[in-house]
Amino acid sequence: MLKRNQTIGNAELLALFGAVDHRPSPLAELAYQSFVYSPAGMLLLNTELQILLSNESICRQLGLTADHLSGQSLPSLIHSGDLLLCMHQLSQFLAGQIEPYQAIIRLTHAAGHTVWTHITVSMLGSQTGNGRYILVQAMDMTEKKQAELALQESALKISSLLETIPDAFIMLNRQWQFTYLNKGAEQMIRRKREQLLGREIWDLFPEAVDTNLYSAYYQSMEEQEPRHLQNYYPPHERWYDISCYPSKHGLTVFFRDITTQKQQEQELLSTKLHLDSMIDNAADSIVILDDTLRIIRANQAFWDMYGYREEELAGNIPKTIPTELVDETEHLFRKVFSGEQIPPLETRRLRKDGTLIDVSLTLSPIINADRKVVSICIIGRDITMAKHLERKLRESQERYRLIAENTKDFVSLMDVRGKVLFASPSHRAIARNPSSGSDNAFELLKEPWKTKAVQWFQDIVQSREARQIELTLPSKEHESMVVESKGVPILGQDGQAEAVLIVSRDISERKKTEELLRHSEKLSIAGQLAAGIAHEIRNPLTALKGFIQFMQSDSVYREQYLQIMISELNRIEQIISELLMLAKPQTVHFQVKPLEPILTDVVSLLESHANISNVMLDWVPSGDMPPVRCEENQLKQVFINILKNAIEAMPLGGSIQIRAAASEREPGMLELTFRDEGIGIPQELLGRLGEPFYTTKEKGSGLGLMVSQKIINEHEGRMHFASRPSLGTTVTILLPAIPS
Ligand code: ADP
Ligand code: MG
C-alpha cells in the first residue's frame, strides 16, 4: 500500500509513519493518506532540505512528477527573488531559533512561471539529532495573489482617475471624518487635503449643518441608500449636483459643479417666460397648429379675435376658415409645411358668431432641430376696422375731390417749389390758368403781386403756418380779379412742409361791395358835413355879397376889396373841392407824400364843423415827419372819420389834440395820434370797433372805422384805440415811413 520511494527506503518510510513489524498501524495509514491526498501541496524534507516525499497536489502546483521531485533540494524550486530570505528563515528554523512558521514565497513552475505559494514549515520527529524531517505544506496562492495585484492596480487606477476628474469626490467615515478627497474636492472646498483629512466635516463646515445636504448625508447613511440632490452653496455662489453612496464604512460623495448648466437653465427658463408673456400679451392673435392642424397653443388675442373660449377649441382644428376659402387655405398650409413662409396676407375669417372679419395673416413654419417642419405659427390681426377706415377714407377723399372739382373756389396743391400738383377745374376762370405740373404757378401774376405772392408762399413753407393774402389775378372775363388766398402747409413726417394747399376765392364782388360801402360812408360824411360846409361857405359868401353890394351902392371900385374877395373865393373853392373829393369815386394811386399838408387840409375842412360843436382842433405839426407811401384821398377819409367821431364824442365841446411824428416806440414808422376829451369807449366794446355797422349813434352808419381799418391795412399800417370812459379816447395810427 505504501509506495516505494527512491530517496527514502521503504523501511525508513514505514518507520516514519510508525509501522510496526513492517506493517503499518492504522494511525500510520491515516497519516500517510492525509499526506498523500491533502489538497495542499506536501513536501517531506530531510534536514539537508532534500525532498524525500511529495504528494500529488505539489506535483500539480509545480508541473513535476513525484519521481522528478524526489531527491531534489528544496532551494532549487524557490524563485531566486525569495531564495535568500527563505534560506535565512529555514536555517533559523533548523537552528531552533524560530518556531514552525508560515511565509508566502514564490516557487518556480516546470514551465518557468512563478507560483505564489503560502508555505507552513514544521518539524517532524525528534527536535535534535537523527530522525528529523521537515514538513512543508504549500498552498498555491497564484490566483489569489494575481487578484490582489489586479486589485491593487485597479485601485491605483481609480485613485489616479479620481485625481484627474474635475468633479469633487470625498469619502467620509462613519464619524463624518474625511478619509479621502481628490484634487477636485480640494479645489471645491478651497482647502488643502492635509487640513481636512481626519477632521469632521460638520466641524469644518458648521454652516452646512441642518441644510438639505446635511439631511441627505444622514438619510443616505441611515437608510444605506444612495441619494441625489442639487444644492446651491451660497459662499461659493455655485450650484452642485451631489450624489451620496453609502457603505458600511462611511459615505462617498460626488460633487459636480452645475452652475453654468443651472444658469443656462435659468436663462432658458426666463427666455421661455419672456416668450410666453410675449405671446400671451401680444396684441396680434397668435396660434400654433400641429401637423394635423390642431391647436397646440393660442394666445388670448386669438380667442378674443374669433370669439371662442379656450376650452372650446384648444386641441381641435380651428373652425375659423370660411367654406369658400378652405381650398385656398389648405394650399397655403401645404406650402408652409414644405418650409415656406407666407408674408402678410389679407383675407377673411369666420368668428364664432358667424360674422366675417377682415384679417391680415402671416404664416410661418416652426422647424425642429432635424430641420423638419413640426408645426406652423399663424400671426393674425383684425383689420376690419382698418379696412372700414380705408373705405371711409377713400369715400371722403372722393367727396373732397368732388368738392374740389366742383367748387367755384380755386383749390390747388403745390409742392414747396411752387410746382402745381393739383388745380381744381375752377382755375379755368383765370387767364393763363396754371395746369397741373406747371413749373411755377406764380409766373402768371403781374408785379407787384408776383413778388408779394412768392414772399407769402415762402413764408408759409418756412413758418409752417397758414397765411392769408389778397392778390389781383388776371381774369378772363374782366380786366382783373381780386382773390383772397389762404395757404395751408402740409407737413411731412419730418415736420417740414411738403406741399402747400391753396384755397383762393374771387372777392372781386366783395371788393366792389366794400368799395360801395366806402363810398356810401363818404357820401354820408359829405351829407353830414354839408351843414358845416354850408356855414363855412355862407360866411365868405356873405362877405362877398357885402363887398359887391357895397361897391354897387357906391359905384366905386375898391382895389383893396378885390384882394379880400379873391381870398374868400379861394376858400370857397377849396372847401367845395374837398367835398367833391368825398363824394366822387377816385382811382387808387399810391404816392410818396408828406403827411403835414394832408392833415392840414383835413383840419381846415373840418374846422367849421368842429366850431359848430364848440370843439377846437389842436393841430401842431412836428418838424420830424418823414413822408409815407399813400393814397392821399383815402388817408384823408380816415382822418375825417376819426376826427368826426372825436367831435361827436364831445357833445359839450372840448379840444382834439392831433400830433404826428416819427415813432419812438417803433422805429421806421410814422405815428399819428388823435386825442379827444370825449365820452370814451367802454373796455368791453373796444374789441368791436371796426365791425361793420357797429354804432352807438342814432344816425351812425357803423362803417367809418371799418373803412378806416381797411385803408390803413392797405397802407401796411396799424390802427389802435385806447380809451378811458368819460376821460377820452386816443386813436393811434402807425404807417411805414419812407426814409427821405
Ligand atoms: P359811426 O360813427 O357811424 O357810429 P364808426 O365806425 O365811425 O361809426 O364808429 C363806431 C362806433 O365807435 C361809434 O358809434 C362809437 O360808439 C365808437 N367810437 C368811435 N370813435 C370814438 C371816440 N373817439 N370816442 C367814443 N366813441 C367812439
Ligand atoms: Mg364815425
Image: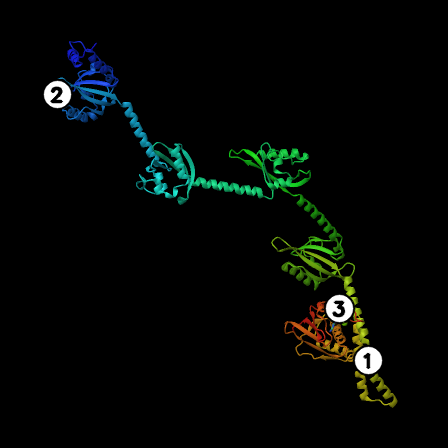
Q: Which residue is mark 3?
A: 707
Q: Earlier in the sequence, mark 2 or mark 1?
A: 2
Q: CA distance from mark 2 to mark 1?
A: 193 Å
> Residue 128: which numbered mark, if any?
2
Q: CA distance from mark 1 to mark 3?
A: 27 Å
Q: Position of residue 520 (x, y in %)?
A: 80, 69
Mark 2 belongs to which amino acid?
Thr
Q: Quadrant of ligand 1?
A: bottom right
Q: Residue at x 20, y 22 (%)?
A: 121
Q: What is the crowding at mark 2: few (fewer than 14 residues within 10 Å), some, or many (at least 20)?
A: few
Mark 3 belongs to which amino acid?
Val
Can residue 594 be seen here? The reply is no
Q: Is residue 509 left or right of residue 268?
A: right
Q: Position of residue 212 (x, y in %)?
A: 42, 39
Asked where in the image residue 615 lies, by quadrant, the reply is bottom right
Pick the residue in front: 237 or 222.
Answer: 222
Asked where in the image residue 117 lies, by quadrant, the reply is top left
Q: Which residue is mark 1?
A: 535
Q: Quadrant of the N terminus?
A: top left
Rendered view: 204 above or below 715 = above
Q: Is residue 449 left or right of residue 284?
A: right
- Contact between marks 2 and 3 (CB within 8 A): the answer is no
**Residue placed farthest to the left in the image?**
129
Q: Position of residue 28 (x, y in %)?
A: 19, 13
